[in-house]
Image: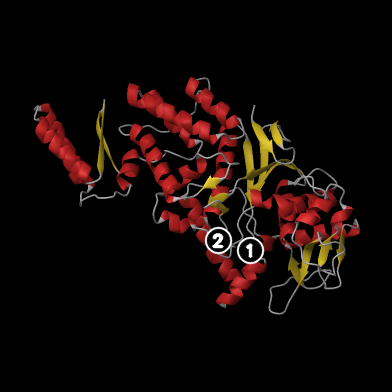
């Protein structure tokens, strides 16, 4: 049975979908005013793996990941660039799609944009106002009355007084309580706006996810995911809005992935210590970056550095090297009773324990190297497919790796030297064979002699 660490319950719980055999999952996506950084990449890859595993487990999955295409940061950046908001967001949505595709992230079933669901947000705000959970302030904003929702704080595990003491909030005389948050922001001069019963304005950040998830998945669904930084206040506020409006439980399982860290600090644009996906992909193969993200447990911190990415590249290279010579093997349905497959499944069913699942892949790679059987090679590819890995031609991956000193050797020249070395060994001219090996080593080429012949890769 699949177990998921539920942030709301603060423990691993057996997963029981609301509808047998079906999973409805919502994940908070990107705010599109700049290029995606590695922290965004982690969210995309983590929940892509979650979705893949749910599907491999036999579930029909409906996966929604939203796009925030209107907020203060977007408006500010558009003004700085002197361009329309929709032109700015269209450019960065296209860039996000390119980054996601490069990382092997499959498109969600729905990618709603906030600007497309304003009518639903207005309806929800109207319901909250009728229930006395929302009020219009003197400045024109419509705010949520936090203290009138009894369950506020259950996701963060803190009382209202603790949250108020720990939260840095500016004193705002128009709010009934400093923790009250905006549902509808009155329009300022020069800003985009929509007409509403409370005057011209635009939605607050939190209401968009409540409205879009309700429209696409219903008022009560299975899994809600996102980065750890969204637990409070964003997800806490989503619960207040959705449960306040509908009078029913909102989400059964809350999942939060850990931060990406650089020098022991969270990677973020506000700290200026972020690396865009594009910058990283200029130096590393995209599958190396995916492997770097996927092999860490999703709830643990992910320490970003060139050293860790180099290690990920070397590890992924070992897996692909085991598949050299098995280019015709494709992923196939898995016999989950096979010992390696059973271990892999037990790991993934234990809160998506990808570190242990990847360890199984290395054990299988060792089996392939030892036995050279097609069955082990196919199982390696099939299990890796559930993580979105090892689906390329091994030769293409290995030959594409950058080297530290190729000496101008192209793949054809390398293959010719390997054949010459094999001929020298067959003729028992070991001095010539050693000379060729040294030439290749000096050029940054690693040779690995296996039962099926010699394979090579770049350092």
Residue drawn where x is 82% and y is 65% of the image: 142
C-alpha span from label 2 to label 1:
9 Å
Q: Choose between 64 and 390: the one closer to the eye.
A: 390
- Side of 52 where 423 appears, left or right: left
Quadrant, the N terminus: top right
Q: Choose between 313 and 254: the one closer to the eye.
A: 313
Vertical position of residue 150 compared to residue 377: above or below:
below
Q: Classify 10 Å Cα crowding around label 1: few (below 14), some (14-19), many (20 and above).
A: many
- First along the sequence among labels 2 and 1: 1
- Side of 440 where 383 appears, left or right: right
| Residue 340 seen in this snapshot | yes
Identify residue for label 1: 69
Cβ–Cβ under 8 Å for marks 2 and 1: yes
- Side of 145 where 338 appears, left or right: left
- Side of 207 where 41 appears, left or right: left
Picture coordinates of residue 216 (x, y %)? 70, 49
Residue drawn where x is 74% and y is 61% of the image: 168
Identify residue for label 2: 93
Picture coordinates of residue 159 (x, y %)? 82, 48
- Quarter occupied by residue 202: bottom right
Q: Choose between 333 and 380: the one closer to the eye.
A: 380
Vertical position of residue 120 compared to residue 427: above or below:
below
Instruction: Tell me the colour scheme of the image.
Output: secondary structure
Secondary-structure class at tag 1: loop
Secondary-structure class at tag 2: helix
Quadrant, the C terminus: top left
Residue drawn where x is 79% and y is 47% of the image: 158
| Residue 57 seen in this snapshot | no
Q: Which mark is residue 212?
A: none
């Amino acid at each position: 049975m699949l177990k998921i660490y539920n942030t709301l319950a603060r423990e691993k719980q057996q997963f029981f979908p609301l509808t047998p055999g079906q999973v409805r999952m919502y994940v908070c996506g990107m705010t599109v005013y700049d290029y995606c950084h590695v922290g965004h990449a982690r969210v995309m890859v983590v929940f892509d793996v979650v979705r893949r595993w749910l599907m491999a487990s036999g579930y029909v999955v409906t996966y929604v990941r939203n796009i925030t295409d209107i907020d203060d940061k977007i408006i500010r950046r558009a003004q700085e660039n002197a361009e329309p908001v929709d032109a700015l967001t269209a450019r960065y949505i296209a860039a996000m799609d390119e980054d996601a595709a490069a990382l092997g992230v499959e498109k969600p079933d729905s990618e709603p944009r906030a600007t497309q669901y304003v009518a639903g947000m207005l309806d929800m705000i109207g319901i909250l106002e009728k229930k006395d959970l929302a009020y219009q302030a003197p400045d024109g904003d419509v705010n949520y009355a936090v203290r009138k929702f009894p369950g506020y704080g259950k996701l963060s595990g803190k009382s209202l007084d603790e949250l108020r003491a720990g939260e840095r909030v500016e004193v705002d005389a128009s709010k009934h309580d400093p923790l009250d948050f905006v549902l509808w922001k009155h329009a300022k001069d020069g800003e985009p706006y929509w007409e509403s019963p409370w005057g011209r304005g635009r939605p607050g950040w939190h209401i968009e996810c409540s409205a879009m998830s309700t429209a696409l998945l219903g008022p009560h669904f299975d899994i809600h995911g996102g980065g750890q930084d969204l637990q409070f206040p964003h997800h806490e506020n989503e619960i207040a809005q959705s449960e306040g409006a509908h009078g029913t439980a909102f989400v059964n399982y809350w999942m939060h992935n850990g931060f990406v860290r650089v020098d022991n600090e969270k990677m973020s644009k506000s700290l200026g210590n972020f690396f865009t996906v594009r910058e990283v992909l200029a130096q590393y193969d995209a599958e190396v970056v995916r492997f770097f993200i996927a092999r860490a447990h999703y709830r643990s911190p992910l320490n970003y550095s060139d050293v860790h990415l180099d290690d990920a590249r070397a590890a992924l290279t070992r897996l692909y090297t085991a598949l050299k010579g098995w280019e015709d093997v494709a992923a196939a349905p898995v016999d989950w009773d096979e010992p390696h497959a059973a271990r892999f499944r037990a790991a993934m069913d234990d809160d998506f324990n990808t570190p242990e699942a990847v360890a199984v892949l290395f054990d299988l790679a060792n089996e392939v190297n030892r036995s050279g059987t097609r069955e082990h090679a196919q199982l390696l590819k099939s299990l890796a497919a559930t993580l979105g890995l090892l689906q390329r031609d091994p030769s293409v991956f290995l030959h594409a790796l950058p080297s530290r000193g190729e000496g101008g050797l192209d793949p054809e020249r390398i293959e010719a030297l390997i054949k010459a070395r094999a001929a020298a060994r067959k003729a028992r001219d070991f001095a010539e064979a050693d000379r060729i090996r040294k030439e290749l080593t000096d050029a940054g080429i690693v040779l690995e002699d296996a039962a099926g012949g010699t394979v090579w890769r770049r350092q």
